[in-house]
Image (cartoon, rainbow, N blue to C red):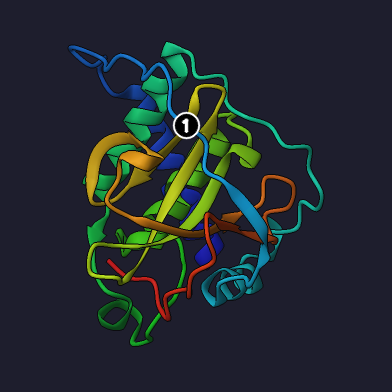
Amino acid sequence: MFRVLAGRLCALAIVSVAAAPPLMAAPAPIITASYATIGDATSVPYGWVDFCRRYAGECDHGQLSPLDINLSAKAFEQIDRINKWVNATVEPITDWDHWHVVDQWDYPTDGKGDCEDYALFKRRLLIALGFPRQALLMTVVKDENNEGHAILTVKTNHGEFVLDNLTDTIKPWDATPYRFVKRQSQSDENVWVQIGPPTTAPAIVSR
């Protein structure tokens, strides 16, 4: 049932975004950003492991050749519209209030979710639009209060940007207030790698 609902929501999102009227002033693509320093393989978040147990078909793509997005004006507009549409459509709710568990990664099939659910949904919609999954990386950070938070890193030929449920603005990864902890490997979505100097991973991912 979850897969059916998720598929319907995904299809609705693609139709809605495609059918939306043109933006009055589409944002200009950001020309350049830097790239994060990636370290060794590290522990995989429990939320991702549990998500893959429930959505096995979406996590079994095996080894892939790293591939970045060609950040054309059209690509940027598509990414920007997905980011804003999901942020406006999904109602924020904590995992405890939603599922009565501390941390659960899922698609917002009922229109509700927290940070990782927003990121997973954006990732799915962008993949459905033809963007390479190797360039759409689930990422765990620590926020200004040292609490766990999840965002989506978009790796492009012009640098790395983040899609965040807390803002509609697509920002270079190093223009955020976050301490980056780890993210998916471009070569294998089930392998996670450190970002920058090693740091203790947050116990849970929220917001």
The quarter of the picture where residue 33 lies is: top left
Residue at position x 41%, y 12% from top? 73
**Residue 13 locus on image (x, y percent):** 39, 40
The quarter of the picture where residue 155 lies is: top right
Which SS class for mark 1?
A: loop
Vertical placement of 70 versus 168: above or below? Answer: above
Q: Can residue 109 be seen in this view?
A: no
Asked if residue 27 lies left or right of residue 38, the reply is: left
Residue at position x 48%, y 55% from top? 139
- Circle 1 residue: 34
Three-letter code, disc 1: Ser
Quick one: which residue is furthest to the right in this view?
Answer: 63
Q: Nearer the viewer, residue 39 or 88?
A: 39
Quick one: which residue is furthest to the front in this view?
Answer: 197
Q: Residues within 10 Å of mark 1 (few under 14, many from 20)?
A: few
Residue at position x 30%, y 77% from top? 98
**Residue 62 locus on image (x, y percent):** 80, 53
Asked if residue 135 lies left or right of residue 71, the reply is: right
